[in-house]
Amino acid sequence: MGEQKAMTIKGNMATAMGAKLCRPNVIPAYPITPSTLFPEKMSEFVADGELDASMINVESEHSAMSACIGASATGARVCTASASQGIALMHEMLFIASGMRLPIVMAVGNRALSAPINIWCDHQDTIASRDSGWLQFYAENNQEGLDLMINAFRIAEDERVLLPAMVGIDAFVLTHTMEGVRVPAQEDVDEFLPPYKPSHGVLDPKEPATFGSFGTPDYYQEFKHAQVEAIEKSEAVIDEVFKEYKERFGREYNKVTTFQCEDADIILLTMGSMTGTAREAVRKLRAKGEKVGLAKLTVYRPFPAPELIKILSGAKGVAVVDRNISPGAYGAVYTDLAGAFANMDERPLLKNFIAGLGGREIFVESFQEIYQKTKDAVTAGEVKEPVEWINMNEDVMR
C-alpha cells in the first residue's frame, strides 16, 4: 500500500482528483457553475502531462453527453461534469447513455433549477434525472466526493452492472469549500480499478455494428427490463466494492450509514452535506436525553429499501428531510421511502420536511425543530401535515 497524501482542496478538486486517479481516456465537458472547476482541473492534468486523456471542449451539455456516449461506446473510460440547467439540457442523452449500458461517470455540483435563476445548492437537478437509469451517489463532504468517484467507476464498469453513474456534491457547500482529504496512491487505485476492457462489442470501424438501434414494441420492454435488472444487480456489487474499498483504503462506505439509531424513537433521514449539521443536532438532543438517531443516504439509486426498512422499522417516527420537491406531491426520498413501507403492517410514522432549497441555510436548530415536530406527531398518533417547509421567509411569502 502506498502512502495516502493529505491535501486541503475544494470539492470540485476532490472529485477531479478522484477521476484522475481512475485514468479516464476521454473527458468531454461544457462549463457550468458550480461544476466548472472539475473540467478546468482535468484539463490542467492533461495539459501538464499528468493524465493521458483526450479533453474535448464542446458547445453545450447536450453535446458533452453525446460525446461521452460516442467515446464510451468505443470502449473508452469516460467521465464528465455538470450541474443544474446543464443536466436538464442533457436529459435526453442521459436515457440513451443508460439504455446503451455505458459506464460513464459524471461529477455533479448539485444546484437548484431555474426559474428564478439560482446557482446555489439543492438536489433538484439530479432528482429530476432519477428515472434515467443512472446510479446515484451523494457525498457528505469532500473526502466522500473523491472516494465515491473511484467507487463509481468500479461499480459502473462491473459486467453485472454496466450503467452510468453520477456523484453529487452540494454546490458551494462542498464544490468551492476547502476541506482536508486523503488522496490514495496511484498504484493502489490501479490495483483497485484495472483498465476498462469491455467484454461486449464496441464501436469499431474494422468490425461495423449497430448500437442503440430502433426498438419496436416486440423488443423495447425487454430492453427496459434488462436495464432494471442491472440496477437491481448493482446493489450487491455496491456492497462488494464498498467492502473492498474499506479493506484497501481504510474508509468505510455503506448505502445507508447510521448514527445513534440503535435505541432511537425518532430517526432523521438525510442526504448530502446537511448530514453533518443533522449529526450535531442529534448530539445536542442526545445530551438532553432525547432518543433520536440519524440515517444518511449515500446511495439513492438503486434505492436501498431493504437497508432502510431494517434500520428504520424499530423507530416510532422518521423525519425525511428532502432537499428537493416534486410539486403537487412530496420530496423524492420521502416518496420512495413511503413506497418501501407500503405493504408492511407495522411501520414507523413518516413525516416529510422540505429544507435547503436554492441554498437556504439548514441550521442545527432546524433539525431540532424537525425532531420536535416529528415527536409531536408520534405523540398525537397522526400526521396532520405530511409535508412541512423549514426556515421559510415569512416576509417574502407576504
Image (tube, helix red, strand yellow):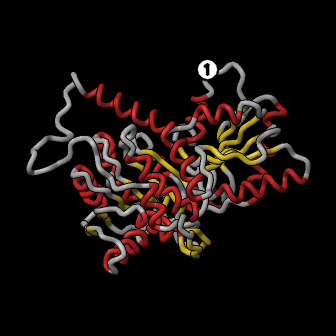
Q: Residue at x 44, y 45 (%)?
A: 135
Residue 86 placement: quadrant: bottom left
x 28%, y 60%: residue: 64
Position in image of residue 9 (x %, y %)? 55, 74
- Residue type marked 1: Asn
- Residue 285 appears left or right of 143: right
Q: Position of residue 382 (x, y in %)?
A: 76, 29
Q: Looking at this view, is 135 or 121 the one in front?
A: 135
- Is 19 in front, or is 240? 240
* Residue 51 appearing in the image: yes
Reply above or below: 57 against 256. below
Mark 1 closeness class: few <14, some 14–19, many ≥20 residues within 10 Å: few
Q: Where's residue 63, x and y in %?
A: 25, 59
Against 182, is 133 above or below?
A: above
Residue 82 found in image quarter? bottom left
Q: Which residue, as the protein is rendered here, is positioned at the far front?
A: 1
Q: Of residues 36 and 77, which is closer to you in this image?
A: 77
For this view, does 305 lie left or right of residue 286?
Answer: left
Which of the image's four quarters has the N terminus?
bottom right
Residue 132 seen in the figure: no
* Residue on which the image places disc 1: 343
Looking at the image, which is closer to me, 209 or 397?
A: 209
Instruction: Report the side of 183 relative to 360 (left or right).
Output: left
Task: Name the residue rendered at 71%, 26% in the picture.
Answer: 347
